[in-house]
Amino acid sequence: MIPLLGEEEAQAAADAVRSGWVAQGPRVAKFEQEFAAIVGAGHGVAVSSCTTGLHLALVLHGVGPGDEVIIPSFSFIATANAVRYVGATPIFADVDLATGNVTVETVDAVRTDRTRAVIAVHQGGVPFDTAALRKAAAGWGVTLVEDAACAAGSTAYGEPAGTGAAVAAWSFHPRKLITTGEGGMVTVDDADAAVRLKRLREHGMNVSAADRHASKQPVLEAYLETAYNYRMTDIQAAVGLVQLTRLAGLVAQRRQFAARYQELLAGIDGLIPVRDPAYGQTNYQSFWVLLDGFPVDRDEVLSALAAKGVSARRGIMASHLEPAYADVTPPPLPVTERLTRNSLILPLHHQLTEGDQDYIVGILRDLARK
């Protein structure tokens, strides 16, 4: 992935610097409003990363020691880490082979009377079945936190992936479609939840620094609870506001590239490319391919691509296989382990050309002949 950043973003950042307001301020507030509107949420709360957003989502819903939180192991390790930040126990669930996402069935298989929340991931931009999981979570009486790190621009049931989420966390890391360098967002529909999230990200203050400075009278703030410094800067938000104007075009372009990859790969036995689920559309933040009966193993494919100048990557990690989670005894996760060991991510960025795609797929065809 190569982020698409241009002169407009550079100018917006420079304008923020020249304004003298570089910490969390008016540009952050505008970015929150515009992002929330695009993803169909009532309120946005800008934070320093999606990881801190997941942490705050769990704090907001009172998840803590003694609670279990069901998560996919098939996700970047931040999903699991956020559970440990609040002292809860991560419980790994398996995922669907086609989407890489948890399902009602895989979550229910590991659910206990200690389950307090579920974190479902829109993996690689592929939306999970929002209607089914939201209904199930409500029936179980547990909080559904949506890890939408990769999902800006994806849709489920004809709506943006964040529409209707009780709480969702988003990433603006450079590997995502839109970026602020580092940064994230939490979206909610409930106004009181948004107020508390804004307090939690800013040391528990009952009035923001921006509001204090805007007041013509002295403001004596109070600190209502132990909280965090998870703020976004106005420089980042200035870049984000420009990036938002690009989102629809970026999604359209990525979907064109993905469709062409799918067409080119269709004639190669043993390769299964990621596709849209029946209920939604992916933004193709990542374009992964599963090796299923391919004559060369995943690591050899990566080496062969690298030798010819192609920067592919291993498939999405499985957290339960990492040393940080060696103390966790997971249930059987056969689909997770199959996906993480036999998949790779092909280049898909906005400087990619059809010639690049032909070259990449040509290498894969040569390997298939082995």
Image: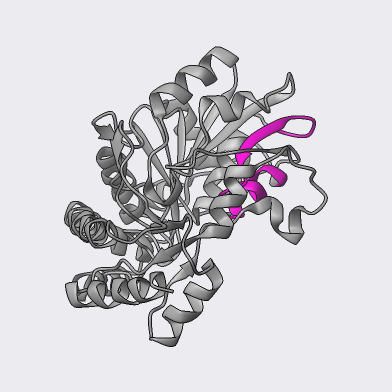
226 left or right of 339? right
6 versus 315 height, above or below: below
Colouring? one colour
48 versus 156 height, above or below: below
- The residue that appears at 79% across and 54% down in the rendered structure is 326
Q: Is residue 71 magenta?
A: yes
Q: Which residue is at the far right? A: 327
Q: Nearer the viewer, residue 295 or 289?
A: 295
17 versus 156 height, above or below: below
- Residue 174 visible? The answer is no
Spot occupied by residue 216 in the image (x, y as percentages of width and height): 37, 48
- Residue 316 visible? The answer is yes
Q: Nearer the viewer, residue 176 or 237?
A: 176
Quadrant of the rendering where the N terminus is positioned: bottom left
Spot occupied by residue 17 in the image (x, y as percentages of width and height): 33, 73
Spot occupied by residue 135 in the image (x, y as percentages of width and height): 46, 17
- The residue that appears at 29% across and 50% down in the rendered structure is 283
- The residue that appears at 76% across and 60% down in the rendered structure is 323
Magenta highlight range: 64-84
Spot occupied by residue 251 in the image (x, y as percentages of width and height): 23, 53
47 versus 61 height, above or below: below
